[in-house]
Image (cartoon, coloured by chain):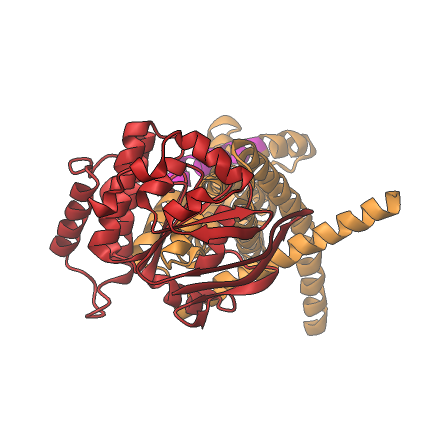
Chain colours: A red, B orange
């Protein structure tokens, strides 16, 4: 379980978080909605401990992530993974090396020994099959399209099977078909790994497709949180705008999770 | 208002200095705890050392040629043509070898290193590394920094040899000096202290170049423009520090050397 306690964060004169509180239950997929620049991505980096808040703290499985630094932080976040907005694949490594990166760096946590080359190859292949990129092992990130990069980034996550998955704008900038593929992958990954997922997006269709609960960030705080259907009925200008964006009754969106 | 701006600039400078020292400290601690893998260091040694050989050879050789030519033309009519060799050797070992090698390595390797780290920073690859529990100080900076610091003196030695070799070829085959006229003063008057000064300078320049370039890369913000600005400023800062430090080391070591010699007189 992740608990965000009263988070405050300022960049120069811009105050992006003003006492943000949030609880993410184990095994659920929480989608954080909000306009661009409200600090959604910053929230994910706080959860991973990559950014330190001005005040407040983040607790993961009862441990205060915010006060950890260096090796103790890296040790704690070994079971967490993040899909970055631009996928953040390592330029100098091909798809296979990117996917195998974590496995090669940390070895097998059960045996505390490095993985065998065949094990890594198999795990990489499985992950790439899952995202539909098998056969691209030797391609460099620069040879991939935006959608393929996102899927390769997801394969890199799936390969090491983290307990906590953080997605930063997973469908932004993608065509609707690829966006839906990514949504399906998020749901499939969630089912496969039984992980806890936090998805940050402003794509309401994506949000309704993958979410167990939705949270709306505005003015540096979570102002509404709830399950998709009641959430979409809330009388609030932003949610009203989201309803108009979807242009359909959210109940008519067949959620993949129930399929 | 002007005072406020000056105060802000001082504060920003002190903040940057603090961050720079902290980065160097973090890299040292991370490396001492868990040294980087041999593969990463080997790749950097190859990239910094082996791939820089042609440019360092060319720089050293051409500098040696020019030094020999200038020395000969200045000294020959005064009957001091025999000092050409020692002029080339002393200048290459104590000043031009370390300085020009550091300049070339800053331009060829340091700038590329800064741009690479800067691009990784702005495309969130550094964050991706950290999100996978990999310390960028250990994985990215440590191999680059230590390989660079190790390679700089070796490349300087290579550059000095190329310079002396260039000066020798010109003096013997163009100015028709006898080989002994070139070599004898070099053998008699080149001291251990000269070699120490050259190597010490190259080591300090290596530390400065690679720590500054890595620091500027890791501090990059914004997009392509930010990477460009970081790279440019890293090269300018390195050149400035190399020149200024060179003066301080020359003055400091020579004063110390003279004092020690006086003690034993």
A47 sits left or right of B261 in the view: left
Q: Quadrant of the C terminus of chain A?
A: top left
The residues colored magenta run B51-66
Q: Residue at x 37, y 67 (%)?
A: A75
x and y percent of residue A188 in the render?
A: 22, 47
From what the image shows, is residue A226 above or below residue B64?
A: below
Give the side of residue B191 with respect to residue A71, left or right.
Answer: right
Position of A105 with respect to B32 (left or right) is left
- Residue visible at 63% across and 43% down? B237
The answer to whether residue B25 is seen in the rendering is no
Quadrant including the N terminus of chain A: bottom left
In the rendered structure, the answer to whether residue B36 lies left or right of residue A20 reads: left
Examine the rendering and report whether any part of residue A4 can be seen. Answer: yes
Q: Is residue A83 magenta?
A: no
Between A201 and A215, which is closer to the camera in this rendering?
Answer: A215
Magenta region, mostly helix, strand or loop? helix
Q: Nearer the viewer, residue A146 or B243?
A: A146
Comparing A254 with B6, the one in front is A254
Image coordinates for residue A17, horizontal then vertical, percent: 59, 52
Q: How many marks?
A: 0
Residue in the image at 81% along x and 45% along y: B5
Name the residue rendered at 29%, 40% in the picture. A183
Examine the structure image and report whether residue B52 is included in the region drawn in magenta: yes
How far across and down, in percent of the image, does residue A155 sit? 25, 45
């Amino acid at each position: 379980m992740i608990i965000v306690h009263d988070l405050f964060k300022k960049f120069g004169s811009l105050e992006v978080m003003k006492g943000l509180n949030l609880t993410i239950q184990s095994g659920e997929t929480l989608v954080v909605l909000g306009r661009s620049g409200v600090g959604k991505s910053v929230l994910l980096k706080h959860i991973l401990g990559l950014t330190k808040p001005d005040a407040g703290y983040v607790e993961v499985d009862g441990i205060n992530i915010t006060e950890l630094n260096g090796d103790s932080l890296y040790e704690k976040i070994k079971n967490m993974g993040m899909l970055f907005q631009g996928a953040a694949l390592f330029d100098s490594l091909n798809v296979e090396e990117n996917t195998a990166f974590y496995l090669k760096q940390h070895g097998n946590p059960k045996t505390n020994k490095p993985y065998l080359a065949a094990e890594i190859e198999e795990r990489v292949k499985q992950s790439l099959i899952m995202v539909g990129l098998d056969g691209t092992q030797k391609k460099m990130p620069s040879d991939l399209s935006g959608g393929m990069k996102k899927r390769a980034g997801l394969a890199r996550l799936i390969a090491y099977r983290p307990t906590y998955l953080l997605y930063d704008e997973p469908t932004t900038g993608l065509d609707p078909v690829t966006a839906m593929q990514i949504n399906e992958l998020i749901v499939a990954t969630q089912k496969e790994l039984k992980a806890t997922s936090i998805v940050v997006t402003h794509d309401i269709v994506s949000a309704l497709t993958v979410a167990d609960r939705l949270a709306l960030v505005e003015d540096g705080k979570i102002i509404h949180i709830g399950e998709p259907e009641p959430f979409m009925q809330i009388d609030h200008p932003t949610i009203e705008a989201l309803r108009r964006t979807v242009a359909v009754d959210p109940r008519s969106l067949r959620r993949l999770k129930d399929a | 208002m002007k005072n406020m701006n000056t105060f802000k600039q001082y504060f920003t400078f002190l903040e940057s200095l603090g961050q720079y020292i902290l980065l160097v400290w973090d890299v040292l601690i991370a490396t001492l705890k868990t040294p980087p893998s041999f593969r990463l260091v080997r790749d950097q040694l190859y990239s910094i050392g082996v791939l820089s050989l042609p440019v360092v050879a060319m720089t050293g050789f051409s500098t040696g040629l020019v030094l020999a030519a200038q020395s000969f033309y200045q000294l020959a009519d005064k009957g001091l043509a025999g000092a050409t060799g020692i002029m080339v050797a002393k200048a290459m070992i104590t000043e031009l070898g370390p300085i020009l090698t550091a300049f070339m390595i800053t331009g060829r390797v340091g700038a590329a290193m800064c741009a690479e780290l800067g691009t990784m920073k702005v495309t969130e690859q550094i964050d991706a590394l950290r999100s996978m529990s990999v310390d960028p100080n250990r994985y990215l900076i440590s191999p680059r920094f230590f390989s660079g610091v190790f390679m700089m003196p070796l490349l300087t030695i290579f550059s000095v040899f190329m310079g002396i070799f260039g000066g020798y070829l010109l003096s013997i085959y163009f100015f028709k000096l006898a080989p002994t006229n070139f070599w004898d003063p070099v053998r008699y008057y080149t001291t251990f202290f000269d070699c120490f000064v050259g190597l010490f300078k190259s080591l300090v320049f290596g530390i400065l170049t690679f720590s500054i370039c890595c620091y500027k890369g890791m501090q990059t913000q914004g997009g392509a423009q930010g990477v460009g600005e970081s790279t440019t400023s890293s090269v300018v800062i390195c050149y400035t520090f190399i020149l200024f430090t060179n003066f301080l080391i020359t003055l400091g070591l020579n004063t110390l050397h003279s004092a020690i010699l006086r003690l034993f007189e």
